[in-house]
Image (cartoon, helix red, strand yellow):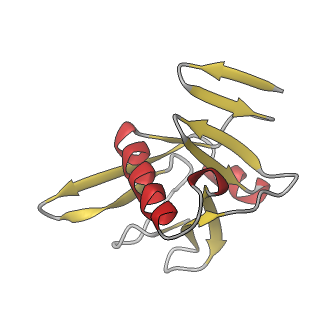
Amino acid sequence: MSASVTGVTISRSRQPVTLSEAAVAKVSELLQQESASGMSEGDLSLRIAVKPGGCSGFSYDMFFDSSIEDDDLVSTFDQVKVVVDPASAELLKGAKLDYTDGLQGAGFHVVNPNATRTCGCGSSFS
């Protein structure tokens, strides 16, 4: 099953996580840097995962990945392909990845409506 809505392509299922325009722009920039080091932008996807750990029980993991498993959920935001495994998708339903760059520092931030508690550093949740 596949549907297209304003530049967003959704495959197999409703996307578990969305990206803000700032996050799409930053990920695109990072993908271009990766392609300059030898990898083709089209070969890489942003994998967003949830793994056990951190001071609140779970932590987010994000990295560029060149492989997509058969059961992965794949969404495309402009030219950025986002991949989420099914177990992580359950914990990320309705989440949004944002990117900010300000006086307090720059970085990605996950706004997750499923998180009942987060730690002070913002990288783990329960």
How many marks can you see? Answer: 0
Name which quarter of the figure residue 43 lies in. Answer: bottom right
Instruction: Judge left or right: residue 97 versus residue 40.
Output: left
Decide which of 103, 51 is in the foreground and name it: 103
Seen in the picture, residue 107 relative to 82 is either above or below; the reply is below
Name which quarter of the figure residue 47 lies in. Answer: bottom right
Q: Position of residue 1 (x, y in %)?
A: 84, 27
Instruction: Judge left or right: residue 75 versus residue 34.
Output: right
Q: Position of residue 81 (x, y in %)?
A: 61, 46
Seen in the picture, residue 113 relative to 85 is either above or below; the reply is above
Instruction: Judge left or right: residue 105 versus residue 52.
Output: left
Q: Residue at x 54, y 24 (%)?
A: 7
Q: Quadrant of the C terminus?
A: bottom right
Q: Residue at x 75, y 46 (%)?
A: 73
Decide which of 25, 121 is in the foreground and name it: 25
Q: Residue at x 38, y 37 (%)?
A: 21
